[in-house]
């Protein structure tokens, strides 16, 4: 993970217009969202291993990703770049267990804190500057 300085930090915005504006620029609501926090993620590579993440907290209201007229206001946190390096293919350590598939579907990451190359940091910074120029109503 590599934090990026940004003027977005601590800014509050209406969730729905922000989601719409960011979606048009390749961002999606991160899968780990909850009613009081979440993130917008944008893949920086075709393999979808390097991401620019814009975390946020809900400042007022409740987040509902399905509602078009969502009235939640969000407050942005510190943006960062993250890189997922994971094992591909079958896990040689896998063992047959009755309930194992419910719990252990995926192998452990090859490197949960992989270093991020300068090219990805530069690409993330450029994308972040683009986001900072947006003014969703």
Image (spheres, grey):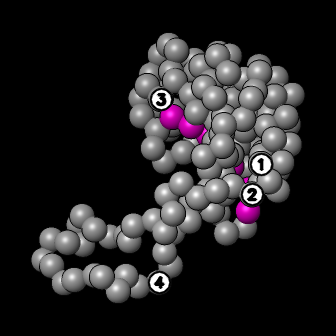
Q: Give the total of numbered labels.
A: 4
Query: How far across and how far down the image is residue 93, in percent?
Result: 30, 82
| N-term-proximal mark, 3 vs 2 | 3
Q: Where does the magenta region start and end?
A: 38-45
Relative to 47, residue 41 above or below? above
Where is mark 1, residue-wise? 121
Closest to the camera, between mark 1 and mark 4, is 1
Side of 12 relative to 60 (left or right) = right
Residue at 77% x, 48% y is: 121
Give residue 117's mark.
Answer: 2
Side of 73 relative to 34 (left or right) = right
39 in magenta: yes
Q: Is there any visible trace of residue 84 in the rendered image?
A: yes
Q: How many C-alpha atoms fall within 10 Å of the one at disc 3: few (<14), some, or many (≥20)?
A: some
| N-term-proximal mark, 4 vs 3 | 3
- Confirm or deny contact between disc 3 and disc 1 (CB under 8 A): no
Distance (Cα) linking label 2 and label 4: 24 Å
Relative to 137, residue 41 above or below? below
**Label 2: element kind:** loop
Distance (Cα) linking label 1 and label 2: 7 Å
**Label 1: element kind:** helix
Nearest the camera: 49 or 25?
A: 49
Give residue 4's mark.
Answer: none
Residue at 50% x, 13% y is: 60
Distance (Cα) linking label 1 and label 4: 28 Å
Give residue 37's mark.
Answer: 3
| N-term-proximal mark, 2 vs 4 | 4
Nearest the camera: 136 or 5?
A: 5
- Confirm or deny contact between disc 1 and disc 2 (CB under 8 A): yes
């Amino acid at each position: 993970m590599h934090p990026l300085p940004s003027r977005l930090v601590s800014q509050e915005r209406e969730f729905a217009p922000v989601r719409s504006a960011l979606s048009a620029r390749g961002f999606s609501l991160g899968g780990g969202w909850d009613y009081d926090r979440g993130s917008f993620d944008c893949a920086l590579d075709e393999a979808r291993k390097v991401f620019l993440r814009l975390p946020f907290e809900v400042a007022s209201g409740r987040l509902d990703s399905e509602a078009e007229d969502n009235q939640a206001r969000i407050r942005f946190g510190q943006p960062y770049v993250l890189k997922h390096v994971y094992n591909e293919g079958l896990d040689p350590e896998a063992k047959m267990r009755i309930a194992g598939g419910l719990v252990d579907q995926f192998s452990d990451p090859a490197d949960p804190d992989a270093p991020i190359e300068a090219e990805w940091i530069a690409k993330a910074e450029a994308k972040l500057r683009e986001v900072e120029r947006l003014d969703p109503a």
